[in-house]
Image (cartoon, grey):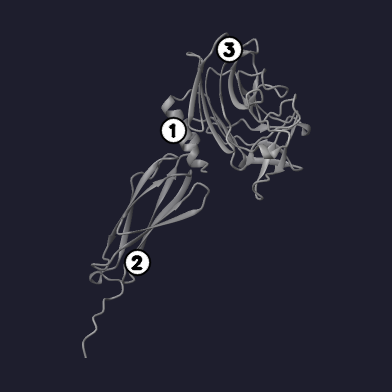
Amino acid sequence: MPSILTRPVGGGGGGIQSVSLSLSDTTPDFGDTITLTATASDFASGDNLTYQFVVRDNVGNWEKTEQTNDNTYDWAVAFSGTYMVCVIVEDESGGSASSCVEVVATTIYTKHGIDHAWNGENATLIGGLVDELTDVGDTGGQDATAPAAANRLRFLQDPRASTNGSFRSITSDYLSTTLSTVQDNITIAGVFDWSQAQDGAGSYMVFMGGTQTTLDVGSRFNIGYLFSTSKMRFAVRQNSGGVGCSVQFDVVEGKNIFVLTYDQSTGVLRVNMNGSTATDTLSGTVWTNTSNFVLLNGDGSLNYGVGWREPTSECMIGLSTLSDADADQLYADLLVKYPA
């Protein structure tokens, strides 16, 4: 009878299979891409090796990427905090080994010097209304709160997704901070969800203003939807209340992302919205009267408005002016944090 040649389970010369995992950076910034390299030992000679890299995605889920005879994996770090990443190696003879390495990733706020940030995941609801958004920025300390129960934002079901809702500001609904709008150098970034279907009469959304009574005065910086042009407008105000400089963009259905920078020494306003960039230069005397940032202002002259869809919405402020390249990198990182 011919002999039957068998290979011991676990392969490679009787040794114990093992794998080591190394990372190009174990303390990356949010949005960085790092390389994972697995080095396998004592697996069956001649067998194909399957590498399964297990990493965390931007919403906290674990993803497994399987590769054959490819021991490296480039991973975009779409989270912050401390987590383990792992690799599992298997040969065709049943041998296997695994290894994990801890990763400590900075927040998007630390990476870009974002002092204050508010997002839909940190909303405090009272009686079905939004009473507060916690400041989760790098410096913090500027929770956005409704001055009174009558000013709380509505929380309504989003008609496009049964599991999500939207923060809606109507008439004098708004959240206030104690952060002054009189800033000479600033970066303001935001992510918001837009749908004309959310209100039959139209949609109105204000991220920032200085008073709850009107979009157009009461603040050095105004960001909101302008009905006269059907566009998002980003403006720096004059002391007279007029517009010192502004840029406008079309709003797209669904997710919109913007990054605004302003430098008082040059008077240049620059905005990247949805990948398109526009600039304008201040004319006249910039607004100098003290006022505080107001978020999700419903504008007293209107009876409807749209705020943020929860949880994919955010507004953030850095009290410095990012360079053009860094502002565009922040935009790119927001695309990572809030993918389509």
Q: On screen, 20 above or below 303? A: below
- Of the image marks 2 and 1, the number of the one nearer the N terminus: 2
- Give coordinates of residue 112: x percent, y percent: 47, 31
Q: Residues within 10 Å of mark 1 (few under 14, many from 20)?
A: some
- Give coordinates of residue 196: x percent, y percent: 66, 37
Q: Are marks 1 and 3 in contact (CB under 8 Å)?
A: no
- Give coordinates of residue 23: x percent, y percent: 34, 48
Q: How far is mark 1 from mark 3, CA to CA?
A: 28 Å
Residue denoted by label 3: 286
| Tag of residue 12 | none
Residue at 53%, 48% (x, y): give it: 59
Residue denoted by label 2: 96
Q: On screen, 183 above or below 85? A: above
Q: On screen, 300 above or below 286? A: below
Residue 340 vs residue 164, the one in the foreground: 340
Dot 2 amino acid type: Ser
Residue denoted by label 1: 329
Dot 3 amino acid type: Val
